[in-house]
Image: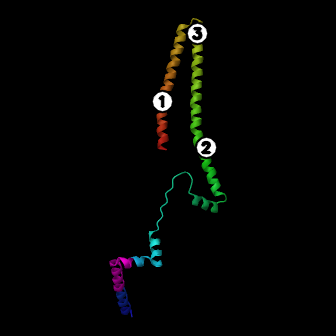
């Protein structure tokens, strides 16, 4: 029985090869075969490949709907999370600029106070002490700015690496 079964398989294989060769050799026949519903269904299954690419802080709309099904108000919670993150992202540089400006104001106030003190010393005829204080303060300020310039690029590099 197995010999007969294998002989039938070989015969079917030969017939299938002949049919394929005939259809491939005749373009009109190939077109007719491709227009049949069975072939069209198989071709659409084989050809249908979907590639989805997404970039951004929020998931795609379909994913948001799925989140809503799994988590109550999931899409709304994700939107609130993204909005809060955006607010924080803009607030951090603003706060940094405010602190830099505040530092400059305090530096100017300190320099003004030292200059006033030096003029008071000059008014009391303490010229040497006045010059010493002024030079000391200027050297200290120059040192602070120099160290600040050296430290700032390193922190910028750390931000880039993150």
- Identify the magenta region: 13-30
Can you give x and y, in whole percent of width and height, for residue 8 in the image? Answer: 37, 90
Give the residue at the far right of this rendering: 72
Q: Earlier in the sequence, mark 2 or mark 1?
A: 2
- Choose mark 2 or mark 1, whichever is in front: 2
Q: Which of the two labelled residues, at mark 3 and mark 1, occupies the earlier sequence position? A: 3
Q: Secondary structure at mark 3?
A: helix
View extreme (front): residue: 28
How many residues crowd mark 1 within 10 Å: few (<14), some (14–19), many (20+)? Answer: few
Q: Residue at x 40, y 76 (%)?
A: 31
Image disc number at residue 21:
none
Badge 2 is on which residue?
A: 87
Q: Which residue is mark 1?
A: 149
Choose mark 3 or mark 1, whichever is in front: 1
Residue drawn at point x = 51 percent, y = 25 percent: 144
Mark 2–mark 1 distance (CA, rounded to whole Å): 29 Å
The first of marks 3 and 2 along the sequence is 2
Chief SS of the magenta region:
helix
Residues under labels 3 and 2: Cα distance? 51 Å
Looking at the image, is mark 3 or mark 2 nearer the viewer? 2
Q: Quadrant of the N terminus?
A: bottom left
Residue at (52% x, 11% y) in the render = 131
């Amino acid at each position: 029985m197995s010999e007969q079964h294998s002989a039938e398989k070989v015969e079917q294989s030969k017939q299938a090869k002949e049919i394929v060769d005939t259809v491939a050799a005749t373009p009109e026949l190939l077109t007719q075969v491709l227009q049949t519903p069975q072939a069209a269904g198989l071709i659409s299954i084989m050809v249908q490949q979907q590639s989805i690419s997404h970039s951004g802080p929020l998931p795609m709309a379909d994913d948001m709907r799925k989140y809503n099904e799994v988590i109550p108000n999931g899409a709304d919670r994700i939107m609130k999370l993204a909005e809060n993150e955006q607010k924080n992202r803009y607030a951090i540089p603003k706060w940094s600029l405010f602190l830099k400006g505040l530092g400059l104001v305090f530096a100017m106030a300190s320099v003004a106070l030292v200059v006033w003190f030096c003029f008071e010393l000059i008014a009391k005829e303490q010229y040497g002490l006045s010059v010493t204080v002024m030079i000391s303060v200027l050297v200290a300020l120059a040192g602070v700015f120099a160290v600040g310039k050296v430290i700032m690029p390193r922190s910028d590099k750390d931000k880039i690496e993150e």
